[in-house]
């Protein structure tokens, strides 16, 4: 009787395996399944369209303009670090002087000077953080200029090789990778844009 009940169950192939998996294992299994589904869809798109592959990370890494931007940003950060060290040294000296004055100042005057010093130190830290953020935003603005210059170049090269679709190379898990336009984009971008000035963007409060 028990065998009859079991044999009458209509199980989907593989469902018993999923049922016995832990929740974490099921999540990983489903994530891999979805990733493979997306990859198959991309492969299907490739079969019906001419796909050009672009390694955007390599384009930016090998771009003369990007190297120029990185060099300028590095110099800005070095200058800021030097200002930070100098400012910290001044604050340390002021703190030592204030500590020495403690024995000759009244408690009220000392507390007043201590509060003023703490406010000054806090303002210095905020200024350093703000300037770091400003440099990062300025770099992003310069990168955007490079990408805007790159867009028509990518479009032109894709059309020249007969591509009807452009896909980021890192999104391809498997499939044909022969129609890659990365190096062509790098060459033309370097020929048209060798330097992008990094201008500090204004900070809004």
Image (spheres, rainbow, N blue to C red):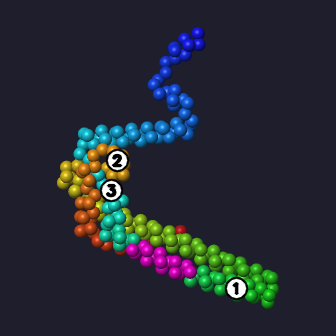
- Main SS category, magenta section: helix
Residue at left offset 39%, top offset 71%: 70
In this rendering, the label closer to the viewer, 1 or 2:
2
- Choose the circle earlier in sequence order: 1 or 3: 3
**Could you tell me which secondary element the residue under label 1 belongs to?**
helix
Residue 137 in the figure: left or right of residue 54: right
Residue at left offset 22%, top offset 56%: 157
Q: Which residues are magenta?
A: 71-85
Q: Furthest-bottom residue in view?
A: 104
Q: Are marks 1 and 2 in contact (CB under 8 Å)?
A: no
Q: Furthest-front residue in view?
A: 3
Residue 104 in the figure: left or right of residue 34: right
The residue singled out by tag 3 in the image is 55
The residue singled out by tag 2 in the image is 172
The one nearer the camera, 142 or 36, is 36
Q: Position of residue 165 (x, y in %)?
A: 27, 48
Q: Which mark is residue 96?
A: 1
Q: Position of residue 8 (x, y in %)?
A: 51, 14
The one nearer the camera, 109 or 168, is 168
- Choose the circle earlier in sequence order: 1 or 2: 1
Q: Is residue 14 magenta?
A: no
Q: Are marks 1 and 3 in contact (CB under 8 Å)?
A: no
């Amino acid at each position: 009787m028990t065998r009859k009940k079991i044999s009458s169950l209509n199980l989907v192939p593989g469902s018993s395996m999923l049922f016995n998996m832990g929740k974490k294992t099921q999540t990983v299994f489903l994530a891999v399944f979805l990733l493979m589904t997306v990859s198959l869809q991309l492969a299907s798109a490739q079969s019906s369209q001419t796909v050009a592959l672009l390694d955007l990370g390599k384009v930016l890494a090998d771009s003369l303009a990007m190297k120029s931007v990185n060099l300028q940003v590095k110099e800005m950060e070095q200058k800021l670090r030097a200002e930070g060290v100098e400012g910290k040294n001044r604050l340390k000296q002021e703190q030592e002087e204030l500590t020495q004055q403690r024995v000759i100042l009244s408690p009220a005057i000392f507390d007043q000077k201590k509060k003023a010093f703490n406010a000054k130190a806090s303002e210095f830290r905020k200024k350093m953080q703000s300037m770091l953020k400003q440099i990062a935003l300025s770099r992003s603005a310069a990168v955007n200029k490079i990408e805007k210059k790159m867009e028509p170049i990518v479009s032109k090269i894709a059309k020249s090789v007969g591509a009807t679709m452009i896909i980021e190379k890192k999104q391809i898990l498997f499939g044909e990778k022969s129609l890659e336009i990365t190096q062509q984009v790098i060459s033309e971008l370097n020929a048209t844009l060798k330097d992008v000035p990094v201008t500090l963007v204004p900070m809004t409060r």
